[in-house]
Image: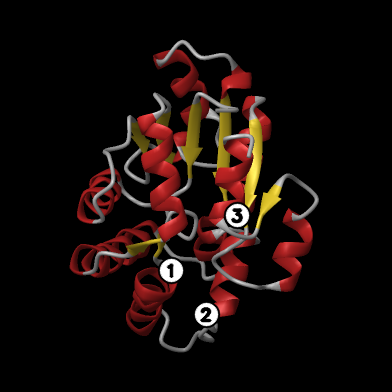
Amino acid sequence: MRYRCLILDHDDTVANSTAAIHYPAFLAALDELRPQAERPTLEGYFRLNFDPGFMPYISEVLHFTEAEERREYDIWQTFVKARVPEIYLGMAHLIRRHKAAGGLICVISHSVDVNIRRDYLANGLPEPDLVFGWERPREQRKPSPWGVEETLRRFSLDPGEILVVDDLRPGREMAFAAGVAFAAALWAHQIPEIHEEMRQYLHFTEPEALEAYLFNE
């Protein structure tokens, strides 16, 4: 293994979840909270999650109040609890292989700890060694490096033993801020401007290519 610890994003890196869960949940939130606002397409939703990012979008573009943010969260959780996303087959194989070889699987995501663990269990994957999700205080969520730093501390790792795999800019920013390696996951969509930016870094268009890289094949 090139890296003892993989820090994986969840949505659209491990789980094929935005189209099935997060996007329709967001449209439902808009129907209630901003019925006059323009509805993004699915591609548009991927784009706004990439830039400016979901939280800046709802706070600085839609100007949600704190109460509206809480309501949006409740609507989102209603969708998440009712639907279990599929795991990309290549990522499922990679995770099982990495764990079997003695590696660590940690998750830093904007989804919630309990839902991430449910998705792993429901898809027959080994439970992650550590999960930091949306339940953390805002200042500890991606792109903050806090989760990576805490992973380093808890497992007594060196920065060179960690690879962050994420499909969006906040994951890249988190990895760079923490001084660890980053790989872009480019298999969830084919949006040109996102691919163009992320191809400047180590990147993979399919999980199988990432697995081959990790195991020096």
Q: Quadrant of residue 99?
A: top left
Q: Residue at x 56, y 27 (%)?
A: 3
- The amino acid beneath tag 2 is Leu
Q: CA distance from mark 1 to mark 2?
A: 8 Å
In the depicted structure, whether residue 8 falls above or below residue 18: above
Residue of label 3? 168
Residue 143 seen in the figure: no
Closer to the camera in the image, 67 or 194? 194
Badge 1 density bin: few <14, some 14–19, many ≥20, Cα 10 Å? some
Badge 3 density bin: few <14, some 14–19, many ≥20, Cα 10 Å? many
In the depicted structure, whether residue 21 falls above or below residue 51: below
- The amino acid beneath tag 3 is Leu
- The amino acid beneath tag 1 is Thr
- Along the horizontal axis of the image, is 114 left or right of 160? left
Closer to the camera in the image, 164 or 38? 164
Q: Are marks 1 and 2 in contact (CB under 8 Å)?
A: yes
Which of the two labelled residues, at mark 1 and mark 2, occupies the earlier sequence position? 1
Quadrant where the N terminus sits is top right
Which of the two labelled residues, at mark 3 and mark 2, occupies the earlier sequence position? 2
Quadrant where the C terminus sits is top right
Q: Residue at x 54, y 73 (%)?
A: 45
Residue of label 2? 42
Residue 209 lies, in percent from the top left, at 61, 51
Closer to the camera in the image, 211 or 150? 211
Residue 20 lies, in percent from the top left, at 36, 75
Q: CA distance from mark 3 to mark 2?
A: 15 Å
Q: What secondary structure is found at the residue carrying circle 2?
A: helix
Residue 176 lies, in percent from the top left, at 68, 33
Which of the two labelled residues, at mark 1 and mark 3, occupies the earlier sequence position? 1
In the depicted structure, whether residue 4 falls above or below residue 12: above
| Label drawn at residue 18 | 1
